[in-house]
Image (cartoon, coloured by chain):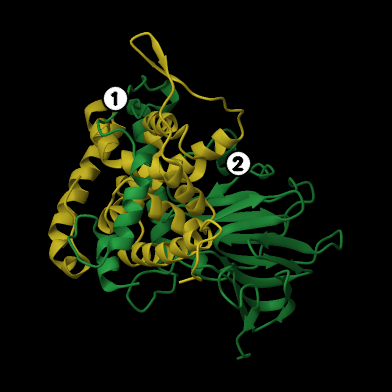
Chain colours: A yellow, B green
Amino acid sequence: MRSSTAPEALDGSEHTEETIRAEEDAQVRAARDGDEAAFQHLYARYRGAVRAVVLTQVGWPDADDLTQDVFVLAWQRLGQLRDPARFGPWLLRCARNRCSDHHRRAKHVRVTSSDHEVRVSMPPRSEALEVLAAIQRMPESYRETLVMRLVEGMSGQEIAEQTGLTHRSVRVNLHRGFKLLRESLGEGQPKGQKGGRS
Amino acid sequence: MTEEELMRLWDPRASVVGAEAVEELEVRMETLRGPRALPPLELPPRTQETSTESSPESTRLWAVALVIAAAVLLAFLGSRPWAEDGRASPPVARAPQMPTPLAEDAPTGWRVDRFEGDAMCNGPGVEETVVRGVPLADDMPLDTGPDTTLRLRHGDAVIELHPNSRVQQRANAFELTHGRMWLDLPVRSDGAKWTFQTDGATLYTAHARFVWWSHEVGTDEVGLQVERGSVELDTGRERVTVESGRACRVSTDRAAEDSRAVHCAPPG
């Protein structure tokens, strides 16, 4: 993952951001023309963001499979994207729509197999699922940003670059979302614990 | 929230003291992370219809079409108002022009009349809705991207949808899931009221011209500004009639004390 900068240093990173954007535009154009290697680069860069969107909408059991589905779908539909600079927001829209489609279908417990053994994916710890459930109850504009940051470990700058949101919007979403999340988790404390709301 | 927590939230690699609350949540969420090694991605061959290759003849035709479109666009840009910073206002920033009455046998229901911007990657049915202008199916979300503008029609009624918006036709109402739109709604031939809904509010009007927004990026606000006519705004907590020239907003932040209370600016 690329290094990110603290908010105070944003102005100094503009040149790097422009270079990154130019490189990515070239990769999108190449992928649009059929270059699989270029698309694999985009996959590596955007997998975290797409996975965060899928986690937010669908939850963990199908997150990894659906994430792969989104990229396969995007590869097939990339010819429809006219502006390479909008690849990130376009891809995340694909992810949301794929999730909507997923909700309309009956789902079963998924198993993964390796070396002829049938294994069930280890579920995350319950505390992680509790936090994810709290995030899923929050306003839509905060959910994806929070999961991108807290689960996929993306920086605010990376979130802005890949979603098309402004730095300010991302900062607002992180600030307000985090505040709401803490309040929500504080309200959900087990009975018997003392202390009011923070 | 402390400055240290903000710095750590912005940059997970920032080494700051006093951001334990953020670090604790990161640790709690660790087991939700995907596999460290990037799973392989197998790409299928692209189908003919999604291929970007084109024959020389169709390339020439596209070139001619682009030249004509560019000429039309230049003529159009020349007549548009410019914002103070020199950028042209997007078409949806202005109120829609009076709609042209349509033939009586036009398809009923909201349908896409005009569309500019990125193609949307959706499931079955949306492409046909956008490209061919068939009426929106129930519960099918229609999204605009950051640079997309979209016009919908329902008979003589017009909606101009802003970028970063989502709408859906529901059984009993047209829903603005999030975003912003201009509406120009004449009296319905059946005498019924137009009904719109969003999280936290339902709007009713016999006829009106107004702009309406809901849960735009980073906000929990629903609001409207009426240019002509009147709109009833029902939040479940209050029901207010918003007259011409008035603007009202509602906070849907459930944690806020005034959640779902309607606040209207003074007229003028």
Q: Nearer the viewer, residue B198 or B8?
A: B8
| Sequence-first tag of 2 and 1 | 1
What percent of the width, then of the height, locates residue A152? 32, 45
Is residue B109 at all visible to an observer of this figure? yes
The answer to whether residue B108 is above or below residue A105 is below
Asked which secondary structure carries label 1, the reply is: loop
Point out the image quarter for the C terminus of chain B.
bottom right
Residue occupying the point 53% across, 62% down: A187
Q: Position of residue A23 (x, y in %)?
A: 18, 44
- Taking the image as shown, residue A187 lies to the left or right of residue A160, namely right
Q: Which corner quadrant of the image does residue B245 belong to?
A: bottom right
Residue A149 visible in image:
no
- Name which residue type carries label 1: Pro
Extreme residue toward the right, this view? B190
Q: Give me the C-alpha separation between circle 2 and circle 1.
A: 35 Å
Q: Chain of mark 2?
A: B
User: Alpha-carbon neighbours of circle 1 within 10 Å: few (<14), some, or many (≥20)?
Assistant: few
> Is B55 above or below relative to B142?
above
**Picture disc at residue B40:** 1
Q: Badge 2: how crowded within 10 Å, few (<14), some, or many (20+)?
A: some
Residue at position x 37%, y 66% in the image: A175
Residue at 60% in and 49% down: B112
Query: For residue A53, which quarter of the picture?
Result: top left
B164 relative to B203, above or below: above
Provide the chain ID for the residue under circle 1: B
Q: Badge 2 is on which residue?
A: B129
Residue type beneath disc 2: Thr
**Marks 2,1: beta carbons within 8 A:** no
| Quadrant location of the N terminus of chain B in the rendered image | bottom left
For this rendering, which residue is in front, B239 or A114?
Answer: A114
